[in-house]
Amino acid sequence: MPTSPTLPDGPWQRAARGAGLLRAAQVRPTIFAEMTALAQQTGALNLGQGFPDGDGPPSVLAAAQQAIADGVNQYPPGSGDPNLRRAIAAHQQRHYELDVDPDTEVLVTTGATEAIAAAVLALAGPGDEVLTLEPFYDSYAAIIGLSGATHTTASLQPTPDGFRLGAGALQQAATERTRVILLNSPHNPTGAVLSADELAAVAAVAAERDAIVVTDEVYEHLTYDGAAHLPIATLPGMAERTLTISSAGKSFAVTGWKIGWVCGPAELVTAVRSVKQFLTYTTGAPFQPAVALGLDLESGTGPDASWLTDQAVSLAHRRDLLSAGLQAAGMTTATPQGAYFVMADAAPLLTGPLAGAGIGTGAELCRALPELAGVVAVPATAFTSPGSTADLALATWLRFTFVKSEQTIAEAVARLARLSA
Ligand SMILES: *Cc1c(COP(=O)(O)O)cnc(C)c1O
C-alpha cells in the first residue's frame, strides 16, 4: 500500500488535493481509472466514460486530412487560425446574437479544458473563491486547487423536472471573496440546462459580488425536448463580465481533437491568452480549418448541413432508451435535458432487490455492477467534494452515458434488467 506523498507542498499537490487525489491515492486509483480497468478486465459495457463510439461529420474529418496533406502542420497563430476565429464569431452571432470581434474577443485553445484552466489561473488566486455548481466536472476542482484559490459550491437538486439550481443556492454560497463563478450549462453530470430564471439568479449574484462568470458550454448543441441553451452572456449586463467557453469535441463527436475556444471582452480574453501562451502557446494546426468548416456547415447546403441537429435527435432517442432501461432495472432517473449522461438513483435497488448484497453506496454498486450486470457506470460522488451537501445527497446515485450506439445501449438495458429480476 503506498504511503502519503512526501514531496514539498507545491502546485502539484494543490491540484491533486483539489481533485481529491491525495486522499484517494492512499486507498485506490481514481474512480475513472478503476472503472475503465474493470470494464477491460470483465468485458462489461462501459457506460462510465463519456466519449462517442461513432465518428463526426465526414466532411469535417476529410478537411483535417486535407489540411495535413496541404502542409498545415506548423505553429498556427497564438490566438488561433483567423478563419476559425471568424467562424466562431459567426456561430455566436447566428445562434445567440452575441457580437464578438474575431481578432480581439476570440481565442482558440487546446480544448475547453485549457480555456477553463487558463481562465481560472488568469482570474483567481490565493484568497479568492471560485464558485461552481455541485456536482461538478472533475477538472474544475483540480484547476481551482492549482490556482491556489478556494473552491466553493452551490448544489443542484434532483426534482421531478430534472436537476435544478434552487432559488438562493448560489447566493448563499457566494461571499465578498467570490472572484469567479465557474458555470456549466448544459451540465455534466446532471444534464441540467439552466433556465432563464436560474441564469438570471446567477447573473444577479455575479453583479452583486462583482464576480466574473466563466461559463462552460461544451454541450451547447446537445439539448433535448425543445430545451434551448441560453448563454448567460446574452443576459442584460452580462456580456461585459462573462467568458464563454465551448469546444468542437462534443458538438462534432471529435473529443480527441482538443480544439476549444473562449469568447468575451477583449481585456478578459487578453488575460486568458497571457496564460495560454505559456501553457501550450498554440493549438493543433490542421484541426483548426476543419473545425471552421464544421461550424459553418449548418449555414450551407452540403450533405452534413443538418449533422448537429440530427445528432441531437438521435441522442434524445438513446437517452430515452437508456432512461427506460434504468427505470425497468429498479432505479429512479432525473431526466437530462442536455449533455450525454443520465443520473440514476440506485436507492430503491439497494433497499429492494439488492438488499442483503452488502452494497450501501453508488461507489460500491459501481464496483459490483460489472459482475452483477455486465455494465460499468461511475458514481455521482466522483463529481462531488467529500462530505459536502451534494456528496451526501448523491451517495446512491450513478452516472451512465448514452453517447454510445443504439445497439450498445439496447444490450446494456437488457443486461441491467437482471438487477431487478
Ligand atoms: C468534455 C468536457 C470538457 C472538456 O472539453 P475538451 O474540449 O475535450 O477539453 C469540458 N467541460 C465539460 C463539462 C465536459 O463534459
Image: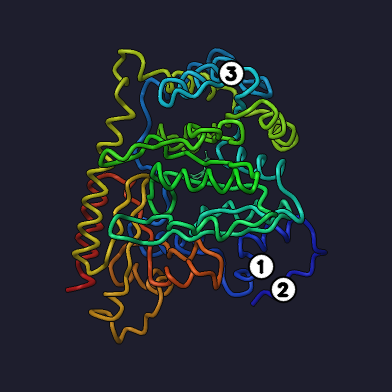
Q: Residue at 44% across / 34% down in the picture?
A: 254
User: To which residue does mark 2 refer?
Assistant: 4
Crowding at label 1, few (<14), some or many (≥20) Cα neighbours within 10 Å?
Answer: some
Badges 3 and 2: C-beta atoms under 8 Å apart? no
Q: Where is residue 277 in the image (x, y as percent from the top left)?
A: 73, 31
Query: Does residue 390 appear left or right of residue 46 in this picture?
Result: right
Q: Which dot, 3 or 2, sits closer to the camera?
A: 3
Q: What's the CA distance linking mark 3 and mark 2? A: 48 Å
Mark 1 and mark 3 in contact (Cβ < 8 Å)? no
Task: Return the residue at label 1.
Answer: 22
Rendered view: 174 above or below 372: above
- How many marks the image carries: the answer is 3
Alpha carbon distance from label 3 to label 1? 41 Å
Residue type at mark 3 is Pro
Q: In which quarter of the image is residue 333?
A: bottom left
Residue nearer the viewer, 270 or 326: 270
> In the rendered image, which quarter is residue 377 located in?
bottom left
